[in-house]
């Protein structure tokens, strides 16, 4: 009942009222990033969702588009703007994803949507993360976020798929709020965010 019906209803209501409450912050961050990123405050990228259907995720753009002499993008750490660092550390970059939740492409809680090029690299257990809608936050995020290995992330994702419940989602929501305040697991050692997944 919860997994198939009530979860979607609660997601829609929470995203709708969340956008209303956070609209002043949304506006301020949008203006700040507009000037920091040459008129591009938002970041759009294709991601696989439930049943591996591709959608465009919406986030605040925390990195600029600076390139090297060969016209290749500079490393993430070199492209993070000052305001981008603040927005990422406070997880404000996730706010626009509430629009994805309203559209039914995402859930508040679920496995984080990764890159489409990772799809052929998953084993059967790792593929199970696509049995549910991806989330803004999830069980892997409150158990290490970017500071844990890919294997651990996928294990947490599969566990969540098998154990979805209202109470688990509430627990993850409150743990996420705690993580935002203590700023844990934002990046892996030596990385601006996390390393690329290269398969098993």
Image (spheres, rainbow, N blue to C red):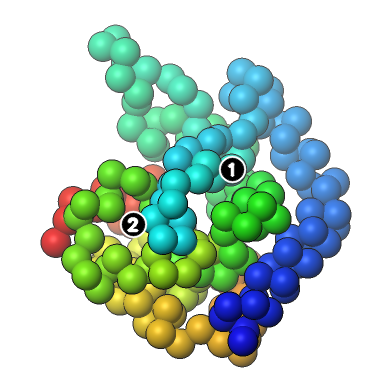
Q: Are marks 1 and 2 in contact (CB under 8 Å)?
A: no
Q: Residues within 10 Å of mark 1 (few under 14, many from 20)?
A: some
Picture coordinates of residue 72, whole percent (x, y) = 30, 19
- Tally the numbered discs: 2
Instruction: Please give left or right for residue 193 compared with residue 43 in the image.
Output: left
Q: Residue at point 66% right, 52% down?
A: 103
Task: State the quadrant of the C terminus.
Answer: bottom left
Instruction: Specify the farthest residue to the top.
Output: 69
Q: Using the image, tell me which numbered label, if any, was put on residue 44.
A: none
Picture coordinates of residue 65, whole percent (x, y) = 46, 23
**Mark 1 to mark 2 CA distance (whole Å):** 23 Å
Residue 73 visible, this angle: yes
Residue named by callout 1: 58
Q: Residue at point 50% right, 26% down?
A: 64
Q: Between tags 1 and 2, which lies in front?
A: 1
Q: Could you say whether the residue bearing mark 2 is in a helix, strand or loop?
A: loop
**Vertical comparison of 21 with 63: above or below:** below
Residue 190 visible, this angle: no
Residue named by callout 2: 188
Task: State the quadrant of the N terminus.
Answer: bottom right
Q: Could you say whether the residue bearing mark 1 is in a helix, strand or loop?
A: strand
Instruction: Please give left or right for residue 163 compared with residue 188 in the image.
Output: right
Q: Residues within 10 Å of mark 2 (few under 14, many from 20)?
A: some
Picture coordinates of residue 118, whole percent (x, y) = 27, 50
Q: Residue at point 73% right, 64% down?
A: 12
């Amino acid at each position: 009942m919860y997994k198939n019906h009530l979860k979607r209803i609660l997601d829609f209501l929470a995203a709708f009222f969340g956008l209303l409450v956070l609209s002043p912050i949304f506006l301020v961050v949008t203006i700040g990033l507009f000037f920091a990123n040459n008129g591009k405050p938002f970041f759009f990228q294709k991601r696989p969702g439930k049943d591996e259907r591709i959608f465009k995720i919406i986030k605040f753009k925390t990195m600029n588009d600076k390139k090297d002499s060969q016209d290749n993008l500079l490393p993430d750490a070199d492209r993070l703007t000052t305001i981008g660092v603040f927005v990422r550390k406070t997880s404000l970059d996730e706010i626009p994803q509430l629009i994805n939740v309203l559209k039914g492409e995402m859930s508040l809680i679920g496995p984080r949507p990764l890159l489409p090029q990772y799809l052929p690299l998953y084993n059967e257990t790792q593929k199970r993360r696509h049995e549910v809608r991806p989330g803004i936050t999830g069980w892997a995020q409150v158990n290490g976020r970017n500071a844990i290995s890919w294997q651990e992330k996928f294990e947490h994702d599969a566990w969540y798929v098998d154990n979805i419940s209202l109470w688990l989602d509430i627990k993850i929501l409150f743990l996420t709020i705690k993580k935002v305040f203590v700023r844990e697991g934002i990046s892996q050692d030596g990385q601006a965010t996390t390393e690329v997944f290269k398969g098993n």
